[in-house]
Amino acid sequence: MVARSQEEVAMSENRPHARSRNPFRRALSQDRPLLGIWSMLNSSNAVEGLSECGFDWVLIDGEHSPVTLPDAIAHMRAAKGADIVPIIRIPWNEPVLIKQYLDAGATTLMLPYVQSAAEAEAAVAAMHYPPRGTRGVAAMHRASRYGTDKTYLAEAGDAVALIVQIETQQALDNLEAIAGVDGVDAVFFGPGDLAATMGYLGKPAEPAVVDAILDGHARLKDKPVKVGVLAPNPELAERFVRHGFDFVSVANDAAVLFTGASALASRFQAVRAEGH
């Protein structure tokens, strides 16, 4: 990651959330687009390697890859110590899952398929201890350093961040209401499911889908919530970054590996076909 000047550091520390206990909110306070990569391979080695590549955040996908809770813990450990923020996408907006992943030490969760303000409010409640929320209380877990962090319970609300995904036409219709829920730190557009609900199954880069995402971004321009997006190809990733999204997933590890490997195989198959 490119080092920042002392002036940039000083400016960022005066922005909202700059002193937050949550690393995702601190990163967002830098007032520049955060570049991320999706991790689908369920490999701690991959996460560890990606953490050294210059990305600002890595998404550990527990919805569409075989990542379990123990896997997620291993991946968070792999990212620890690197200048990268691990975000965990859990399989569903479910209070028990949210509690388990928070207790396991996840600090930033992404929840799929949130379609209404009521669903967002339920997610926020599950993220926080009473009286603000409904998160169950335990003393001996990884998040509290197994009980050695005596400030954890008091400061846990500032330690966690919530990202909700906008993935359906219904969610788009309710966008401002969802984004306005206190405790929702960011919304994240998922073009794959959004395309499907708009009648473009398997076509996340369809112009109508992209336009809907850009329109959603414009609708939230004056809101305090941060806005992110998953880019289905490098061209759209560049467009989203230039457009001013706060955080953008520019690739996923599986695609990088297999696209690169396929290109190498094709190159040397051509060499072989030319003869020795």
Image (cartoon, helix red, strand yellow):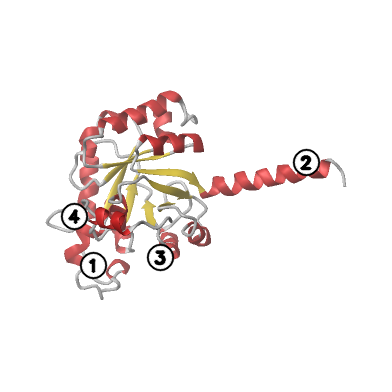
Element assignment for label 4: loop
Q: Return the residue at label 1.
A: 138
- In three-dimensional space, the C-alpha distance between marks 1 and 2, rounded to whole angstroms, equals 60 Å
Amino acid beneath label 4: Thr
Residue name at image x 16 percent, y 65 percent: 154
Could you say which disc has been placed on residue 134 in the image? 4
User: Is any part of residue 199 visible from this angle?
Assistant: no
Q: Residues within 10 Å of mark 3 (few under 14, many from 20)?
A: some
Element assignment for label 3: loop
Marks 3 and 4, the one that precedes in the sequence? 3
Query: In the rendered view, does 61 fall on the left or right side of 104?
Result: right
* Rendered view: 132 above or below 210: below
**Residue 78 image point, x, y percent:** 45, 64
Judging depth in this view, the residue of 31 and 228 nearest the camera is: 31
Q: Return the residue at label 2.
A: 270
**Residue 196 image point, x, y percent:** 43, 29
Marks 3 and 1, the one that precedes in the sequence? 3
Element assignment for label 2: helix
- In three-dimensional space, the C-alpha distance between marks 3 and 2, rounded to whole angstroms, equals 42 Å
Point out the frontmost of discs 3 and 4. Answer: 3
Q: How many marks?
A: 4
Amino acid beneath label 3: Lys
Amino acid beneath label 2: Ala
Element assignment for label 1: loop
Query: In the rendered view, does 269 fall on the left or right side of 230?
Result: right
- In three-dimensional space, the C-alpha distance between marks 3 and 1, rounded to whole angstroms, equals 23 Å
